[in-house]
Image (cartoon, rainbow, N blue to C red):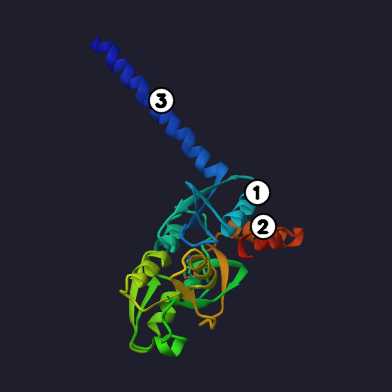
């Protein structure tokens, strides 16, 4: 009996090792991993337990270009660049804006979307009409974002950082902060679903979204730029635009 147990344990261990070798192989050669923060509609968000959105559809084209399957890792926005560097993910598609600071650690693809930072306030707030009125106020932002950078530049403002834009909006509704600075499309999206908040017309910046890869990863960068060009040339990009932004 003892012998039998020993044998079967050994057999099982082999099976596990074999399985992990096989899947290990599969992960590296048959998939490409997108890193994102899936709390940024309409670019990436959960539909049930599936992550979908504009960026996801672009990423699917990238996977097609590489002839592999797309895998998505949902990570805190702040941790995305690190996960590129540690090769936990192959590219980041997360409504990420190109900026000089990030360019030091990653390579960006061609830009695929022009965005801006906007101000969200409670619907009944008449005092905050634009950037000037944010001086000395409590401003909520998503940690590690360009919106956070903008808010940190506002005179005497107290910047409160959250893991997601949505969490910042919730705290604003609870009266803990005065305003939220967030990217334009997610802001519009949240306002559409919430009649207690409004988005101010005047935007604070103009930014270009691009897909980021680990510095020097020419293979994936080329596939991304090819995918973007393919989507634009085929008219598919316009269709996606219509689907997610209208
Ligand atoms: N566009 C902003 C940035 O790049 C926010 C992106 C996001 O929150 N997903 O920092």
Mark with earlier residue (1, 3): 3
**Horizontal and vertical percent for residue 68?**
60, 45
For the C terminus, the quadrant is bottom right
Say whether mark 2 is within 8 Å of ligand 1.
no
Front disc: 2 or 3: 2
Relative to 7, 191 lies left or right? right
According to the image, label 2 marks what residue? 227
Q: CA distance from mark 2 to mark 3?
A: 39 Å
Location of mark 1 (residue): 64
Q: Secondary structure at mark 2?
A: helix
Total marks placed = 3
Q: Is residue 148 left or right of residue 214?
A: left
Q: Is residue 70 visible?
A: yes
Mark pair 1, 2: CA separation: 8 Å
Residue 171 falls in which quadrant of the image?
A: bottom left
Q: What is the C-alpha distance between the residues marked 1 and 3?
A: 32 Å
Mark drawn on residue 15: 3
Whether residues under marks 1 and 2 lie with C-beta atoms below 8 angstroms apart, the answer is: yes
Q: Is residue 67 left or right of residue 217?
A: right
> Are the residues flagged by discs 2 and 3 in contact, CB closer than 8 Å?
no
Query: Where is 84 relative to 105, above or below?
Result: above
Residue 155 occupies quadrant: bottom left
Secondary structure at numbered mark 1: helix
Picture disc at residue 79: none
* Residue pictured at 52% horizontal, 38% vertical: 26
């Amino acid at each position: 009996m003892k012998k039998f147990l020993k044998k079967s344990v050994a057999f099982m261990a082999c099976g596990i090792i074999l399985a992990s070798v096989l899947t290990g192989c599969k992960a590296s050669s048959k998939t490409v991993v997108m890193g994102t923060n899936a709390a940024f509609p309409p670019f990436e968000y959960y539909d049930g337990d599936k992550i979908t959105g504009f960026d996801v559809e672009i990423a699917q084209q990238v996977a097609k270009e590489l002839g592999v399957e797309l895998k998505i890792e949902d990570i805190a926005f702040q941790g995305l660049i690190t996960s590129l560097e540690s090769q936990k993910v192959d590219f980041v598609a997360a409504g990420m804006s190109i900026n000089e600071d990030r360019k030091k650690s990653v390579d960006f693809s061609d830009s695929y979307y022009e965005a801006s930072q906007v101000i969200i306030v409670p619907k009944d707030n008449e005092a905050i009409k634009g950037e000037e009125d944010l001086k000395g106020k409590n401003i909520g932002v998503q940690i590690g974002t360009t919106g956070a950078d903008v808010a940190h530049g506002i005179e005497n403002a107290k910047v409160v950082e959250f893991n997601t834009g949505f969490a910042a909006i919730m705290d604003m509704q609870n009266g803990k902060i005065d305003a939220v600075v967030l990217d334009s499309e997610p802001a519009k999206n949240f306002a559409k679903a919430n009649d207690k908040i409004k988005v101010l017309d005047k935007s604070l910046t103009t930014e270009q979204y691009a897909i980021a890869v680990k510095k020097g990863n020419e293979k994936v960068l080329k596939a991304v730029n090819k995918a973007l060009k393919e989507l634009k040339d085929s008219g598919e990009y316009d269709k996606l635009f219509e689907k997610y932004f209208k």
